[in-house]
Image (tube, rainbow, N blue to C red):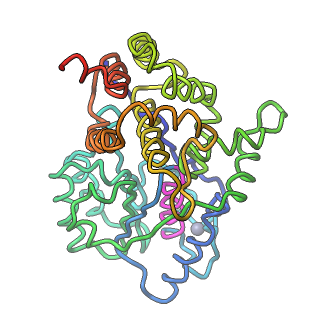
Amino acid sequence: MRSKRKGEVTPKVMEGRAGVGLPWLEGVAARFQEVWRSGYAPQAMLVIGARGVGKKQFADWVARRWVCRQGYEGGIAPCGVCPPCRWSEEGHPDRFWITPAEEEGVISIEAVRTATERLRVAAHGERRAVVIAPAEGLSRYAANALLKVLEEPPPGVLFVLVSEHLGRLLPTVVSRAQRWRVGVPDRATAVRWLRGACPQKGVEMEGEKIEQALALVGGGPLAAQEVLARGWLPWVERFVRDAGERVWREPVSVAVEWGKRVREEENGISWRVLFDWFQRWVADVCAVALGPQEGEVSLFFPYATELLRAAAGHRPIQEWFSLWERWRAWAQWLYHPLNGTIQGEALWLGYAGVEQERKG
Ligand SMILES: [Zn+2]
């Protein structure tokens, strides 16, 4: 069974005059406007940043703002009344997205060719925009086809590439695009926004839960919102207890339980979600095992230092680093279809070192 990619944030169709939408994006949006005003608007930009900081929302705003008939002098919000502002999200030749076919997570060369064809059709306005997200989804052939377009871009077309993994992009594509970083907002801004964004039947979300979710995802408010909205925190807590303590006593039962859980995608927890938690957990175990360090290391599981320390004690620090390295190398295969049961169980057994024991 192929798993669908979870946690994708699809930009909403903006009705009427709407700004950049997320408060912490206003700074970067204003900078874009300023660059445009100074006459240095790029032909291709690469929007980078951590997960859940609003890269797609920023790219969407750039595209809408760019095609609006009112130029840079019109303010952060597109005018909302000119024809390009009233186009629907899909299917207009002057402003569109290139995204992977959902199941494979890969942007094919055909998708890039179709887009190029659309750009050959006479433009309706003087400016057009193409958003490519995620840019690391471009197959090698697709990236090369795109490169050809970027080398001689049609006039007035702005390409907006969105990426979370800069290292996975073709360097020649990276060098053709102006880099725009969307930063993680400060905690107070993120917490304030999450309180408004996750109302739970009139009950105000506990600050502690918001902090836990933000820490887990490394500060991206949209990623934290997903954790909260899907009700993952109790599962994260169970994961923490299992990884910190239980798996060292009964590795096989823990592995089998989680294997079943991710196979059935209970509560939307796929093996990719589990793997993500695991990578962050092992990073924290390494940090804790290193002991007190200069400057403060921000942990993904700051409330679980006792359990992190307990886990760290189960093997030499070099082995923790080697596990972390091995999993980091695996991460690039995340979007390949895999058997959830085997993967879920293998993660736990590998984590607890059961495989090695069997081999030895
Ligand atoms: Zn407009």
Q: Is residue 65 left or right of residue 80?
A: left
Quarter residue 160 falls in: bottom left
Quadrant for the C terminus in the image: top left
Q: Residue furthest bottom?
A: 38
Look at 41% across and 55% down and name the residue there: 96
Look at 16% across and 59% down and name the residue there: 144
Q: Between residue 46 and residue 320, name the one nearer to us.
A: 320
Query: Which stretch appears magenta?
Result: 52-66
Q: Is residue 96 left or right of residue 175?
A: right
Q: Is residue 239 above or below residue 181?
A: above
Q: Between residue 80 and residue 13, name the one nearer to us.
A: 13
Quadrant for the N terminus in the image: top left
Q: Residue 100 location, x and y as percent? A: 33, 42
Look at 22% across and 16% down and name the residue there: 358
Q: Between residue 334 and residue 323, name the one nearer to us.
A: 323
Residue 20 lies within the magenta run: no
